[in-house]
Image: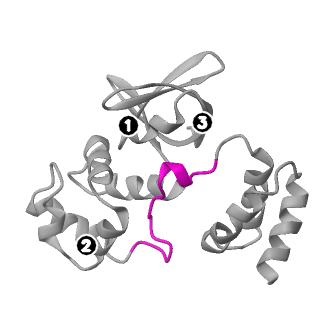
Amino acid sequence: MFEYLNGKLVKISPTNIVIDLSGIGYLISVANPYAWSALMNTEVKIYVHQVIREDAHSLYGFVNESEKALFLRLISVSGIGPKSALAIIAAADNEGLINAIDNSDIKYLTKFPGVGKKTAMQMVLDLAGKFDATGAVGISLLDAAPASNLALEEAIEALQALGYKATELKKIEKKLAQEAGLTSEEYIKSALKLMMK
């Protein structure tokens, strides 16, 4: 199973993007392929979920872990498959979707492609109250960290492993990114100083 891929974005089509990783092109279905246009021919990090069926092996891609978590929750609902889940993510602001689920807003949920009243009710039944404080709210592609600063990514992951919340780290990540050329250890020290202020 794959968690994410780091590679060069080489192609965008109406339903997919292609990431070139060591000479292999990975075809990845994403919610809004053209939202990736600004990152064409650059190194990107994309979170993925692999679906293996008898007739196909498919990769579904996400801007961040939150969007992936939302996708996984959606496909856990009876009646929602991977393509429907991507369509829901593409059509909604994720925060609005989560609020609609938590508030049992069936009318809002039935606006999504392939979601009828029965499926909307099942979404509420299965998912209401299951989103954490940060929710599964996505960020825009332009806010996503470029894959090139591996030391910063390692530092953020290490801080999360130490128990710091993603929301706390998000607040300081842009400041840290401005300090180019640091090692992971130096980023961690700098992050701790920023959080102590």
Dominant SS in magenta:
loop
Residue for point 27% across, 46% down: 87
Residue type at numbered disc 1: Tyr
Mark earlier in primary sequence (2, 3)? 3
Residue for point 65% across, 73% down: 165
User: Marks 1 and 3: in contact by CB < 8 Å?
Assistant: no
- Quarter of the image for residue 17 reads top left
Q: Position of residue 168 (x, y in %)?
A: 66, 74
Relative to 151, residue 33 above or below: above
Look at mark 2 in the image and give the residue it sits on: 100
Magenta extent = 130-145
Instruction: Using the image as rendered, state which of residue 196 and residue 81 is in the foreground.
Output: 196
Q: Position of residue 108 (x, y in %)?
A: 16, 67
In the visual, does 61 lie left or right of 102? right
Q: Position of residue 65 (x, y in %)?
A: 53, 55
Find the distance from the CA under tag 2 to the CA under tag 3. 31 Å
Relative to 90, residue 107 above or below: below
Residue type at numbered disc 3: Leu
How many residues crowd around disc 2 within 10 Å: few (fewer than 14), some, or many (20 or more)? some
Look at mark 3 in the image and give the residue it sits on: 5
Observer-side mark, 3 or 1, equals 1
In the visual, does 60 lie left or right of 46? left
Mark earlier in primary sequence (2, 1)? 1
- Quarter of the image for residue 117 reads bottom left
Instruction: Using the image as rendered, state which of residue 61 and residue 144 is in the foreground.
Output: 144
Find the distance from the CA under tag 3 to the CA under tag 1. 19 Å
SS category of the residue bearing label 2 = helix
Residue for point 71% across, 73% down: 164
Look at mark 1 in the image and give the residue it sits on: 34
Quadrant for the N terminus, please.
top right
